[in-house]
Amino acid sequence: MDGNGRWAKQRGLPRTAGHTAGEENLAAVVRSAVRLGIDHLTVFGFSTENWVRPRQEVRHILGLHKKLFGRVAELNELNVRVRWIGRPFDDPAARTPRYVQRAIAKAIRDTEANTGMTLTVAFDYGSRTEIAHAVETLRRDGREITVEAIDSALYQPDLPPVDVLVRTSGETRVSNFLLWQAHGAPISFASAAWPDYSSDDLRAAVELARNSPNHR
Ligand code: IPE
Ligand code: MG
């Protein structure tokens, strides 16, 4: 969800205000996604690379994830099930603080009976790290390294392949997000910074997915 910093800068606000607006817009986009009948929405909340940002900004973003995972009443009302992808908490390189771990675990538990959309939040996530972890897991178990085996060893093997990838804020580069899962997927480019990403933008992404021949 790119562009929170730029959104804030344009308004003469601190970057943290952009992240706050971004978290609020995610709640709105989740509502739109449910209305559009989307089965899976996966969002990149915080990457394995984001830890190098200034301490105060990281702390603010962590607090926003606690808030996000705390939106259980809202998610239950929408029949949305929450999941998480990221570096396992027991990985020596993992840095997710306990209070965020607890918020993630609680949100998953308190929404697991919901049968509508699945909202997967990527936190402390990096696609290359995920693929390396999958291969390492297979190697340790003495398994053959095949495409199907790697599929089955990803953080969330149940996550379906990506139908459309969204890039916000005019970004045209590929990020370290679902690289394995998104092969062949069309990319929906939105000029809006994430806090301004709208239900119309989301509808355009869904249309793109519908009209794209399947290259998988
Ligand atoms: C996305 O907004 C939020 C996170 C990466 C956590 P950015 O912080 O990347 O915003 P820009 O790219 O500086 O505008
Ligand atoms: Mg950015």
Image: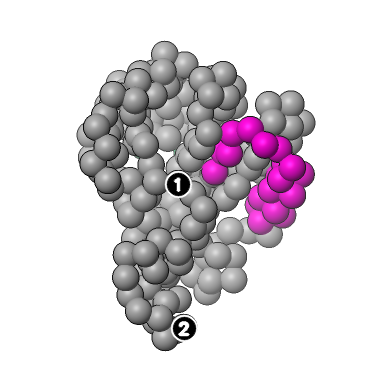
Left or right, residue 106 beside residue 85:
right
Residue 211 in which image quadrant: top left
**Which of 199/64 is in front?**
199
Q: Which residues are magenta?
A: 100-120
Please give the residue where the numbered disc 2 appears in the rendered image: 141
Q: What residue is drawn where x is 47% and y is 23%?
A: 195
Cα–Cα span, label 1 and label 2: 24 Å
User: Is 178 above or below relative to 7?
Assistant: below
Please give the residue where the numbered disc 1 appears in the rendered image: 160
Q: Residues within 10 Å of mark 1 (few under 14, many from 20)?
A: few
Q: What residue is drawn where x is 63% and y is 33%?
A: 116
Report if residue 206 lies within the magenta region: no
**Which of 157/97 is in front?**
157
Circles 1 and 2: CB atoms closer than 8 Å: no
Question: Between disc 1 and disc 2, whose residue precedes?
Answer: 2
Q: What residue is drawn where x is 49% and y is 70%?
A: 93
Q: Residue 136 in the image: state x and y as whole percent.
A: 40, 76
Which element is circle 2 on?
Answer: loop
User: Is 146 above or below relative to 206?
Assistant: below
Which element is circle 1 on?
Answer: loop
Q: Amino acid at mark 1?
A: Pro
Counting every numbered tag in the picture gives 2
Residue 20 in which image quadrant: top right
